[in-house]
Image (cartoon, rainbow, N blue to C red):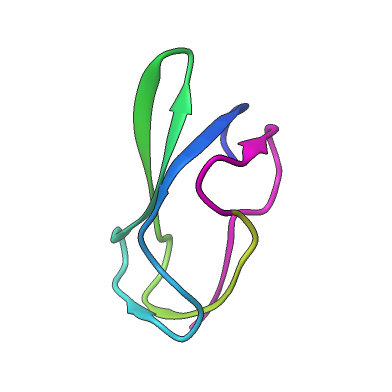
Amino acid sequence: APLPGAIIEVKVIPGDSVLKDQTLLTLEAMKMESDIHSTLAGRVRKVFVKKGDSVQEGDPLVELEP
């Protein structure tokens, strides 16, 4: 996670194919919503969070494989 906050939406599941810069989830931090995008094109290997989870800076959110 880029900063502490709460997950308000998860848009992918393991096995999904994603494009570079595709929105993976939405994080709410300091009353602002931020979309978290993929850094590469590939497949979702694992999703570490679910809607409502609180996360800290540096927590893993989604694992991608090229």
**Residue 31, relative to residue 1: is it above or below?**
above
Residue drawn at (36%, 76%) of the image: 41
Q: Quadrant of residue 28?
A: top left
Left/right of residue 30 with respect to residue 60 in the rendered view: left
**Residue 27, relative to residue 4: is it above or below?**
below
Read off the magenta span. 50-66
Where is residue 3 shown, x and y percent of the image? Answer: 59, 28
Residue 35 or 10: which is nearer the viewer? 10
Residue drawn at (39%, 81%) of the image: 16
Q: Does 6 lie within the magenta span?
A: no
Q: Quadrant of residue 56?
A: top right
Left/right of residue 1 with respect to residue 8 in the rendered view: right
Left/right of residue 43 with respect to residue 46 in the rendered view: left
Where is residue 52 shown, x and y percent of the image? Answer: 55, 40
Where is residue 50 shown, x and y percent of the image? Answer: 56, 53
Query: Where the N terminus falls, by quadrant?
Result: top right
Where is residue 27 shown, x and y percent of the image? Answer: 45, 36
Residue 11 or 24: which is nearer the viewer? 11
- Report the magenta stretch's main SS: loop
Residue drawn at (66%, 37%) of the image: 55
Left/right of residue 18 with respect to residue 4 in the rendered view: left
